Image: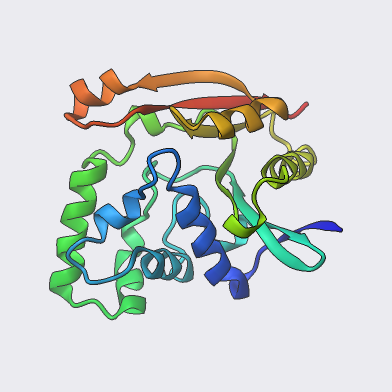
Amino acid sequence: MLNLRKANASDIPLLARVEYEASLPPLNQSFWDEIVQGTETPALAFVEAMLKAEAGNWGNAEDFWVLEEDGKPVAAAAGYVPGGEDYRPLNLERLDALAAHLGWSTETTEAFRDRYQQFWGHDPKPIFLKPQAPFIIETVAVLPEARGRGLGKTLVQMILDEARALPYSHAGIMVINGNDRAQHTYESVGFKPYQTYHADFFAQQYQLEFPGFTKFCCSLN
């Protein structure tokens, strides 16, 4: 039996695992691993601290939905209303609170800040991360032991059903180019391509080797 419920603070270890897993495909590597280099902090521990400190721009614990099968969590995703002045994943105004959870020194915190901004850029509102809809679904992941049974599609469909009770016209989601499985899943529940940033854009604008991504939209009417 499948059940969808809102997450709470006790789910944070699960949500950290989900957020990390969601950052891996299709490159099989996570940007979280990249930006915590030099801090001696595992990426999973960092993401967990970020959720505890409510320092995420792409969904905090209360924004997540958890899919359970027979009472056991098998998948989760964030569904949130984008806002604020920073489109990047981390709210740097909460960095000190996050660092306190991790026991970082001032030097480690500032070194991390510099590395984060080198990775994501100093502009807090890069055009390629501008939200394409008033409601965003992010960090969708099925736990590895539960994959292969269509639970990702079920999760997204259930979140869309919940979102239709909200006063928003559209939902948005984003897929890294090359993650064909995720793209097929999202298109099967009504998402349509909205805007694509190709590898050339990141190579020319940011001297970054990255496959790019496609933003999708889905009507909630």
Residue 165 position, x and y percent, is 80, 41
Depth check, front residue: 1 or 4: 1
Residue 55 position, x and y percent, is 41, 61
Does 202 sit above or below residue 59?
A: above
- From the viewer's perspective, tell me whether residue 76 is left or right of residue 55: right
- From the viewer's perspective, tell me whether residue 2 is left or right of residue 94: right
Number of marks present in the image shown: 0
Q: Quadrant of the N terminus?
A: bottom right
Q: Is residue 65 visible?
A: no
Which residue is located at x 26 percent, y 61 percent?
36
- Which quarter of the picture shows residue 218? top right
Which residue is located at x 60 percent, y 25 percent?
217
- Which quarter of the picture shows residue 75? bottom right
Residue 166 position, x and y percent, is 74, 41
Which residue is located at x 45 percent, y 56 percent?
20
Depth check, front residue: 42 or 103: 42
Q: In the orientation shown, which residue stands out farthest toward the bottom?
A: 103
Q: Is residue 32 visible?
A: yes
Depth check, front residue: 91 or 51: 51
The chosen color scheme is rainbow
- Which quarter of the picture shows residue 118? top left
- From the viewer's perspective, tell me whether residue 6 is left or right of residue 33: right
Q: Quadrant of the C terminus?
A: top right
Residue 52 position, x and y percent, is 47, 71
Which residue is located at x 47 percent, y 65 percent?
51
- From the viewer's perspective, tell me whether residue 160 is left or right of residue 88: right
